[in-house]
Image (cartoon, rainbow, N blue to C red):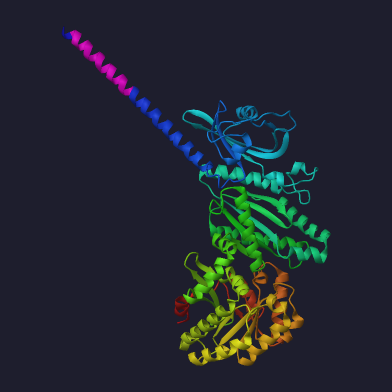
Amino acid sequence: MYDMWMIVGVSALTALTVLTVLFIVLLWQFMVSKKKLNYTRNELSFLKREREYYDEAMIMFDSENTIVFANESAKKLFSLNDENETYGISKKVQLRVQDEMPTEFFETIHQLKVQEEDSFKLKNVALIISGQEKKVNIFLDKSNLEDKETTTCVIDSSTEEITFLKNSKEGTVDFLTGLPSQFVALADINFLVIESKKKSESFALFLLGIDHFKELQTTLGLGHSNQVLKNLSQYFLENPEEHISVYRMDADNFLFIMHGLDDVELARTMARDLIVSVGNVFRKSNDTRLTSSVGIALYPQNGENASKLVDNVYIAHEQAEAESDSNIKLFDMEHHVIREDELTMKDDIRKGIIRSEFLLYYQPMFDLEGEQMIGAEALLRWKHPTHGLISADKFLGIAEKSGLIVDLGEYVFNEAILQRERCGVGARPDFQITINLSLKEMQVEKLLPRLEILFAKHKVEKHMINLDISEGVAMENIDKTANDFKLFKDFGLSLSLDHFGAGLSSFKYLNMLPIDVIKIDRSLIFDLTLNLKHQTTVKAIIDLAHTLGYKVVAEGVETSQEASILTALHCDYAQGYLYSRPLPANEFEELLS
């Protein structure tokens, strides 16, 4: 009897153990399935953001070709209703890969994915819809949803807008330069977006363009300008770099994909090195004084598909070229929003003046011989209630068009004169505050009496304020500039010509302007340590300026090597990040003291 109970007890224990093990196995399978499901749902959530993929058709389907998800573009393409089912007379959708006969879309995809692992892409395949054919790129990714094998498919048809020559390998190679074309760039970016999203990685786009390229074409002709592009492209082809892909986009624009790049400062450094390298190519090709500028867009901060990233890197490049030569700009959403809504911005500027939202930052200038601070440039900033701190280049154009530049000009004069008074005993007697302001809409005759009151009120000598105007603006209307400068000079202000050497420097007009200082543009300083021709040009400007009795300031000095060369060339003063970034008034006063 006892033995029987022992047997029953052991059997019960064994059954309990089996049940426990079975429960653990089932629980483990459930957790794994849940993890896979969550991963796929996150992936699906990413794809469902059709606002980002507004041009591309996106569809997810299982092994039985049942559609799990489709965005609006896909629903139109495959004639799907809200439940992702076909309605009415559905369109016949086929694919032709290479030179094979067209077959039904899902059948073709099924055959291809058997041969591939995980993610893959189809470049430049023919999508045939009800007999109409167009070239597309297709990106495919295998995954699992609720224990079912699924395929996520992105159909990019933006390539149909681009035309290519028949002898250019079906559009994959740019016929002039031999580099991969914009067609390939768009395909590679979209594929990289999908891969980077899954791996939580970043990358950057650089768009490099040659400064003043249209003027080069007009002056030297199409043949010469094309040769410039060929020389540059040959350099890129002969000097490939790991993790960097290069493409020819349009005209003088070259696109670089910087794989794995997510650091803003490193991006700036790499862009600077790129500009210097391109400058060396131009010099070796005898294309004297050709410079380039770079716009930067980062994934995912500045867009999550090829269309948006490329649009934004073009915007950044446009802003870089507009500001100066050899310039670098990261895409700035605030700047883009401001440009898109000028009417609102005009009203905001008007309100900002009333609410005292504008302020001045100060970037010190130093004597190269004694390394003493001899002055500072006042830079206008706007503490916008919505967009935050905005630099002047983003709103001065709107202020000029609206006439509000006059009120801003008076504010800048008032603050600069007040700041010079605050400098007081801490500054040397000849310490100057430089104002960099457009004179396009200024009525100098009406302004001077008000300035007289400000100088008297703050007990500041007039020569302690220097007025800066860019060479480009000065040469637009040399007669008006000469007249305005004479009025300011007779009033007692010091005057300087900014960005000298950025364009076709007009030496013959210098005697028409009663200036005291010439400021050499940063595009000549940018690669001074490597560019012997720039050293020669800078020396010529300094020698001529000294002969005419002008002092010389070098702009954008960033390294001690540049400062040493400028000292050897007898440049008088320098400003740039080597010495100090632009500072708010309180920090500037601390530095001065």
Q: Give the image location of residue 9, x and y in percent.
A: 21, 14
Q: Quadrant of the N terminus?
A: top left
Residue 365 visible, this orientation = no
* Depth check, front residue: 180 or 249: 249
**Looking at the image, which residue is at 56% across and 40% down?**
71
Q: Is residue 177 left or right of residue 383?
A: right
**Looking at the image, which residue is at 66% across and 42% down?**
157
Q: Give the image location of residue 39, x and y in percent.
A: 47, 37
Eyeballing the image, is 461 above or below 33? below
Q: Give the image location of residue 347, x and y in percent.
A: 54, 70
Magenta: main secondary structure: helix
Q: Quadrant of the C terminus?
A: bottom left
**Looking at the image, which residue is at 75% across and 48% down?**
174
Residue 428 visible, this orientation = yes
Residue sitting farthest toward the left: 1
**Looking at the image, which residue is at 54% across and 80% down?**
412
Identify the magenta region: 3-21
Q: Is residue 244 magenta?
A: no
